[in-house]
Amino acid sequence: MSQLSQHAVVTQEGDFVVQLTSPIQAHFRYRSWAAGFGCERWEAGHWCPEELDFALPLLAAAATLPADDPIVQFVAGIPAVIRERVAPYTYKQTLLLRWLARSQPALELFTHSAQLCWLLVCFSDEQQWSEETTAALLTRSRVEILQVIAGVGHKALVKALGRVQLDKGDYQELLVLRDFLGQPSWLERVKHQSSINIYALCAYRKFPLLLNSAWIHQYDYSDVTSSTQLHMALCEAYRYWQDALNMAALLEMADGHIALARCASFDDIKALHDRWVDRLNQSSHLIRQGSTLFPAPPLAGNEHIFPITSAEDLFEEGRLMHHCVGSYVRSVQAGECYIYRVLSPERATIEVRWLNGKPDIAQVSLAYNDRPSEQTRLAIRNWLIQVTDMDGAPASGLLLNSA
C-alpha cells in the first residue's frame, strides 16, 4: 500500500486518485464520502463508473501509514464511527462503504445488524443485482432480507447473527457465516450465548461430529488467530473422537455417543478412548462370522514392516500397542484399508488406504498413539516407494497424516 500511495493524491474535493503505470496501467479514483464513495476509471478523457471492486484495504492501511500519507488523508474523510465499525469487514469493504455512503436504509441496517448488511452487500455483488434490486431489498425487514439471501429467516437467527464476533472479516469467514445460517443445530448450540466467536463456527464447520461434544462448546478460542491453526489444534481430538465412536459400535455400546458427548475436555475424551481401547483389546468375542483371515495384503512387507493378516493378530497389535487399531477389523475385512506392523526404527502401526488409485499412509502410530520420529517416517516413506515402484514419488498423505 505504501507503493500505491506514491502514485496517489487526494484532491481538493476529497477524492482519492491513483495513476499506475507498472505492473499494470490504471487510472482510477474513489470519490469522497460526501460524494458517495463511488469508484471511477479515467477513460477517453473523462471519468466513467467502475463496477469492479479493487478491494483495496484502505482502512487497514490507514491504521499503519503516517499521517501525511494520501490514504490516511482520504480515509479521514469517512466518519470515525463508520471507520471503526466497518474495519472488521475486509472482504468487499470498499463496496460496503459505498453503500453506507449513499444509502440511508443501508446505513440503518448496518447500524442495527452489521453482519446482515455485509452479507447482503456481498450476496448482491455475487448475484450481479442491479442497484435498484439491492436498494429495494434494503427497505424490507431484517427477517425478509435474511430469507432472500440465505433461504431461511426468523428473528432468533437475525439476533444470533448479530452476536457473531469476526476476526478478519475475509471471504472464508463469510462462508462460515453462510453455513451457520443453514444449520439449525448450530443455532441451537449458540442461541443463549451473548457473544459467538467466529472460530467456534469454524470448528462446527470443519468437525461436525464434535458438535455434540460438551468440550467443543467450552473450548477457549481467545488465542486462535486462523482457521488453519484451529484445524491443527482440533485434528487430534477429532481423530480420537472418531476412533472412540468406532470402538463403541464394535463393543455394542448403544450409549457410547452419550458418554463421549459428556466429556468436558480433550483429556476426558482421550481417557475414555483409552479405556475403550483396553476393553476392545480384551474382547476376543468380537471376532464374528466367517474366516478371521483378511484379504491378501495389497503391498508386500520387508524385513522391518509386516502385514497383519488376521483379525486375531490385529487385536493383538492393539493390545500390545495400547491403541484402537482393533476397531479397524471391519474396514480391513471390507478392503477399505490395511494394517501393517513396523518393528524398526521404532515399534509402530501403520494404516494404508487408497487415494485416487494410489496407496496412501493414512496414519502412523507408536504405542499409546504417540507420534513417530522423522526417522521412522522416512523409513516408511522409502518402503512405500520401493514396494510401489513410484520413482521416488510418495503418496500424498505419507508425511502429513501421521498421527
Image (cartoon, helix red, strand yellow):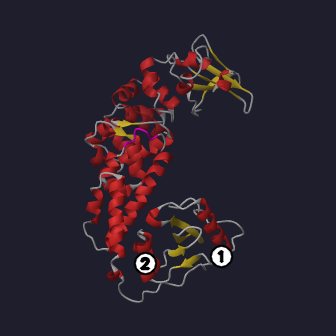
Q: Is residue 264 among the parts visible in the rendering?
A: yes
Q: Position of residue 111 (x, y in %)?
A: 36, 26
> Tag on residue 316?
2
Give the quarter of the figure containing the N terminus. top right
- As shown in the figure, which amino acid type bears the numbered disc 1? Val
Q: Residues within 10 Å of mark 1 (few under 14, many from 20)?
A: few
- In depth, the one of 127 and 324 nearer the eye is 324
Please provide percent x and percent y for residue 180.
37, 47
Q: What span is colored magenta in the figure? A: 220-224
Question: Decide: marks 2, 1 in contact (CB < 8 A)?
Answer: no
**Seen in the image, is 360 located left or right of residue 393?**
left
Q: Position of residue 340 (x, y in %)?
A: 53, 75
Q: Earlier in the sequence, mark 2 or mark 1?
A: 2
- Measured in 3D between alpha carbons, the distance from the residue under mark 2 to the one under mark 1, in whole angstroms, is 26 Å
For disc 1, the marked residue is 387
User: Hey, which quadrant is residue 7 in on the image?
Assistant: top right
For the point 32% across and 72% down, the residue is 279
Residue in the foreground of this view, choosing between 348 and 338? 348
Image side of residue 63 versus residue 317, left or right:
right
Q: Residue at x 60, y 75 (%)?
A: 304
Instruction: Relative to 317, say whether 241 is above or below.
Output: above
How crowded pointer 2 is (Cα within 10 Å; few <14, some 14-19, many 20+) is rated as some
Q: Secondary structure at mark 2?
A: helix
Q: Residue furthest bottom?
A: 291
